Amino acid sequence: MTTIHDIPPEILAASFEVGIYTWGIGYLRPLSDVCQAWRDTIEHTPRLWGIISFTRSRSAAALLRQLAKAKNAPLALTIEPLSITRSASKSSIRKDKEEVLKALLGRVGGWVSADVGTDLLAKCRWEDMANLEKLIIRRGGPQNQDPGPFFTSEYECKNLKLHSFSTTGGVPSRWVTPFLKYSPSIRYFSLHTGNKSQTYHTYWHSKLHDIRDTWTYLALVPNAYTIELTDLAHTAPAHISSPPPILFRSLRTLRLQEVRYAPAVLTPLVVPNLQTLSLEHTRREREAWSWRYANSDMDADSDHRQHQLLLAPVFTQWSAPGSVPEHLHTLELKDCLRSGDVPFLVRWLERLPHLVRLVIQDDQVGAAKEGHDADPDANLYRALSSPRMMTSQKDLNGNLPMGWLCPELMILHLDTDNALDDVVSIASARGGKVVQLLKPPSSMPSRLRRIETRLCPMAGPEDVQLLRSLVDHISCVCTNCGLMLESLSPGQ
């Protein structure tokens, strides 16, 4: 019988490594008492001790002991900027901290992962970081802090190993741009101007961010697989020329959260192989911003600014030949639409044959259904519940074939101020029942497997039972019911 004592040391070390990244180096202390084999694995695997978290709460002596145990192993560092810039109450402790920093800087060539501030990087040279694979950089000094000699003009070191680059806390562009310029192998790029330690809503605390900097950064990471933009309070793009198209052949995942003027960021992007798109809280009303950006460009050219909040131009641009992300399988839209966007969204969905998961959390979808009766494409629920003329698939004779929107859709999340009938009609059409038509489509859509929507305010037990007979799983998005659909009774 196999026991924990039979686990190979290399497997143990890998699992311990995950634990250290999650809970810190203290995670190893109780593991050393399990058995002698585990103790030996811990003591004789230097790379475990090379995962170093430098915080104000850790003593310099403990950090130096850990660094000694790491020997010549690669180092994965997390160093709080405040650990360096703020001295402790006793000067002797400050000197001890400086001794640790000196030891770490002496081994900068062994850094493979670093989460550090610009104040520490200013003490290094980029050309010495040839083994760095992952970098999270935070602003550890004033907004106008200059990199100084970190990037030397006479030696432009291209780091071919750096594949993951993130910024947080509003790092100045004079730091970010050279990193991206000298790192052509970046696969993951994250831009975040807020503070990860803040648990409250950070949008109001963001500094204005020049949208031209964002365009520049994106143009410098054409080989990225994943791009995440978070908490960017962009300046208004009015009177600023949009950049030329930016092609991402390898981009698979694109996430924008709390990004002001997101449409202006998205429109230039060409992402033919995108698989996951997530837009969250990118719609911001004038009233919500007025106190924060009074007398700024927020008040200039209001009509033009309102137009730039619409996602319709993005859906139109991404519907052009060569720009359609035909491989998109997951689409998340949360509080980012306006009612005028919905018809353009529907027509764009027509071009996404492989979409499997659709998540929409936005009351503007319900508003579009009520307010645009003249445009049949304004009703997303009807578009999903019945075949339609496929305007994007005109044949040689100019005929429009019948087809289904998102024929491979299996998971649908709707929190859109929708009626129960809207959900039932979609489930009935895609839950396995055959729709009788004079001219049936060439193929039926995949069976819808899961529906997540707001049920408890409008659904009784009979409605829940009907939905269960049509799809495999139903969930209520309401926090009040706790997803306990079995307890629903009429009127609840």
Image (spheres, rainbow, N blue to C red):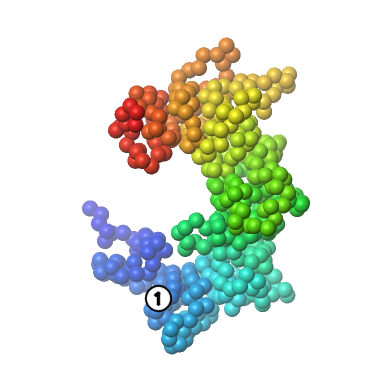
Residue 241: horizontal and vertical position, in percent? 77, 51
Residue type beneath disc 1: Arg
Residue located 75% across and 53% down the image: 240
Locate residue 301 relative to residue 342 in the image: left or right. right
Label 1 element class: loop
Find the residue positioned furthest to the left: 1
**Image: 168 above or below 395:** below
The residue that mark 1 highlights is 58
Pick the residue in front: 149 or 203: 203
**Image: 310 above or below 66:** above
- The quadrant holding residue 374 is top right
Residue 57: horizontal and vertical position, in percent? 40, 75
Residue 50: horizontal and vertical position, in percent? 44, 71
Residue 458: horizontal and vertical position, in percent? 40, 29
- The quadrant holding residue 32 is bottom left
Residue located 46% across and 24% down the image: 421
Q: Can residue 126 be seen in this view?
A: no
Pick the residue in front: 404 or 185: 404
